[in-house]
Amino acid sequence: MANTSSAKKCVRKMARKTEVNKNRRSAVRSTLRKVEEAIASGDQKAAREALNAAEPALMSAVSKGVYHKNTGARKISRLSKRVKALG
């Protein structure tokens, strides 16, 4: 448990930041799930559109520090490879 006032403030800040990061991570997962569903249905056009929406969302989360840079690049690379294979 935090004892000093500065430590208590740090706990409050972390709680706010955690909430924001949870929301960002959830939004990114939703966009990635839409890409996965489009790939599973076999519709390349829908998958490409979903990927075009997911890529900026994921890279935005990367720039905010929610994901590591290489994680974002790896996810985009693997998804685009799978979308391309549909064609």
Image: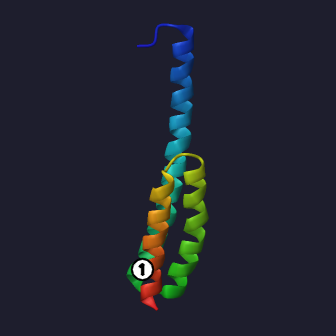
Instruction: From the viewer's perspective, tell me whether residue 66 is left or right of residue 53.
Output: left
For the image, the number of numbered tags is 1
Pick the residue in front: 3 or 69: 69
Residue placed farthest to the front in the image?
70
Q: Position of residue 19 (x, y in %)?
A: 52, 38
Give the residue drawn at x 53%, y 56%.
27
Q: Is residue 42 above or below residue 3?
A: below
Residue 78 point in image, percent of width and height:
42, 72
Left or right of residue 41: residue 21: right
* Residue at (54% x, 59% y) in the render: 58
Report x, y in % for residue 41. 41, 83
Figure quadrant of the N terminus: top left
Amino acid on which the number 1 mark rests in the picture: Arg
Decide which of 75, 34 is in the foreground and name it: 75
Q: Which residue is mark 1?
A: 82
Nearer to the camera, 32 or 64 = 64
